[in-house]
């Protein structure tokens, strides 16, 4: 039975491997969570996940669907050249992919094969901080995690393949990149890890803006304490991000609306 306001999309579960289906479920959950935590921009922006066992293939959202309605079956599988490998039957809507999304995500997945997930957002907080000359300041414990965040200068809407090289260069081996006058990008080895990075980056941006709005001097932290705190966030000194909270976040979504699994 068709429900008002809900797209009817045939299941892709029988058209992919169990590993790809799990990647689809996790990625759909990530879209819902980014929206739930106030970091979505209607149908703009994009999150991608590699397809386990298929080198160069990744999943990304159909351009035209809101984050809150993304499901496992609605995701489109593409290769590094932008060729659509598989997608569901969207009927007369016939959704494709966002060109800027393809350029950004294909660049990162090609250059960083260890990356399982890439998240790009235009949240109000990350856009605001991206426009500040000072960038992200290490003024809270959370923001100290991003002591070595990368910066990418604005070159216009990311539609040209020529920009892939500079995006990859500016990201380097980091987990987070502020796109100047634009927004934010993070990567993770898993979807859960990437969401953790983005959630914390968003908190760091929001708290900086709140502190700066108080119009009083900011409290500095000694360089050696900054370095020690940053080091405590690194993979060699703690468990991978997402391991503990991702199952809990999935349970949260299941309580709210389990349709992301469809």
Image: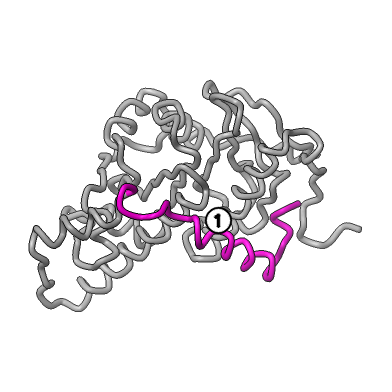
Q: Residue at x 33, y 25 (%)?
A: 165
State the predominant SS element of the stretch in magenta. helix
42, above or below 168, in the image: below
- Which residue position holds label 1? 42
Q: Which residues are magenta?
A: 235-262
Of residues 241 and 209, which is closer to you in this image?
A: 241
> Residue 73 placed where, x, y %?
73, 44
Q: Is residue 42 above or below residue 87?
A: below
Q: How many marks?
A: 1
Badge 1: residue crowd in 10 Å (few <14, some 14–19, many ≥20): few
Residue occupying the point 52% across, 45% down: 47
* Location of residue 66 in the rendering, given as x and y in whole percent from the top left corner: 62, 54
Q: Is residue 249 left or right of residue 137?
A: right
Which residue is at the front of the view, 42 or 179? 179
Task: Tell whether 243 sits left or right of 183.
Answer: right
**Residue under the image location 25 percent in, 39 percent down:** 153
């Amino acid at each position: 039975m068709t429900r008002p306001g809900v797209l009817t999309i045939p299941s892709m579960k029988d058209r992919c491997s169990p590993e790809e289906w799990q990647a689809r479920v996790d990625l759909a959950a990530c879209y819902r969570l980014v929206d739930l935590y106030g970091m979505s921009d209607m149908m703009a922006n994009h999150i991608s996940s590699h397809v386990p066992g298929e080198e160069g293939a990744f999943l990304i959202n159909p351009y035209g669907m809101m984050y809150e309605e993304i499901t496992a079956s609605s995701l489109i599988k593409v290769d590094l050249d932008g060729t659509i490998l598989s997608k569901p039957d969207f009927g007369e809507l016939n959704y494709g992919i966002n060109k800027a999304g393809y350029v950004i995500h294909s660049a990162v997945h090609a250059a960083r094969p260890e990356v399982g997930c890439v998240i790009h957002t235009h949240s109000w907080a990350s856009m605001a901080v991206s426009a500040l000359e000072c960038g992200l300041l290490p003024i809270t414990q959370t923001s100290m995690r991003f002591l070595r965040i990368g910066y990418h200068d604005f070159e216009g809407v990311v539609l040209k393949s020529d920009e892939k090289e500079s995006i990859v260069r500016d990201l380097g081996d980091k987990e987070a990149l502020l796109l100047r006058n634009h927004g934010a990008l993070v990567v993770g080895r898993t979807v859960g890890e990437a969401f953790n990075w983005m959630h914390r980056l968003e908190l760091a941006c929001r708290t900086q803006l709140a502190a700066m709005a108080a119009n009083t001097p900011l409290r500095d932290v000694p360089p050696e304490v900054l370095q020690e705190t940053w080091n405590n966030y690194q993979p060699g000194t703690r468990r991978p991000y997402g391991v503990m909270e991702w199952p809990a976040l999935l349970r949260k979504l299941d309580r709210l609306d389990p349709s992301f699994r469809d």
